[in-house]
Amino acid sequence: MADSQIVLFACTGNYYRSRYAELYFNARAIPALGWRAKSRGFQLSAENAGPIAPCVPDRFATLGLFISPEMRFPLQLQEQDLARASRIIALDVVEHRPYVETLFPAWWHRIDYWRIPDVDGMPVDQALCLIEREVDALLDQLTAPDHTTYGD
């Protein structure tokens, strides 16, 4: 199999939304089609307890999807992460566009934005459902016969 193309999901803390998008994408993607997801955060928080928001493994259990008990801690977004990605998605345009404009202004044209706010703007269950819907649509798009990436 050829090297996988990378979808990079970014949110503020890489603790809840982007991590769920990454894990859900990888659980649903067919490896032979050549896509894998990674995730990073614009501004990590020391206030987050543990490596991942508890709602993420809870949701996987509810859906009957496997999630490894070995979880990494959140990772800070670096320019090299952006450079390695074939697709870049920030989880909320209102919250994340200012981070892009400040931290990575040269990348604004390569980032797609969804509208999935943090817990103060949308209930967790609703946000997770929306992430699932967006990821499923993205997987359909990426695996369509006429799909192209940024470099094509």
Image (cartoon, helix red, strand yellow):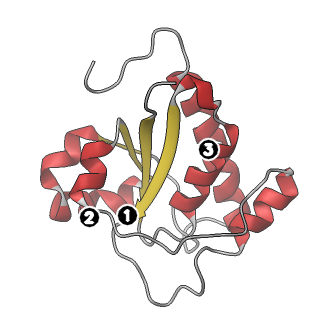
Q: Which mark is residue 99?
A: 2
Residue at label 3? 26
Tag 2: amino acid: Tyr
Q: Circle 1 — which element?
A: helix
Tag 3: amino acid: Asn
Q: Residues within 10 Å of mark 1 (few under 14, many from 20)?
A: some
Give the foreground label among 2 and 3. 3
Evaluate if marks 2 and 3 touch, with contact meaning CB atoms under 8 Å apart.
no
Tag 1: amino acid: Glu
How far apart are the two marked residues, 2 and 3, measured between alpha carbons? 26 Å
* Quadrant the C terminus occupies: top left
Residue 88 in which image quadrant = top left
From the top left corner, tell me how far across and down residue 114 is, in percent. 46, 47
Q: Quick one: label 2 or label 3, which is nearer the N terminus?
A: 3
Residue 87 in which image quadrant = top left
Q: Residues within 10 Å of mark 2 (few under 14, many from 20)?
A: some
How far apart are the two marked residues, 1 and 2, measured between alpha carbons? 8 Å
Out of 141 and 8, give the one closest to the viewer. Answer: 8
Evaluate if marks 1 and 2 touch, with contact meaning CB atoms under 8 Å apart.
yes
Evaluate if marks 1 and 3 touch, with contact meaning CB atoms under 8 Å apart.
no
- Name the residue at the front extreme: 1
Residue at label 1? 95
Q: For this view, does 35 lie left or right of residue 90?
A: right
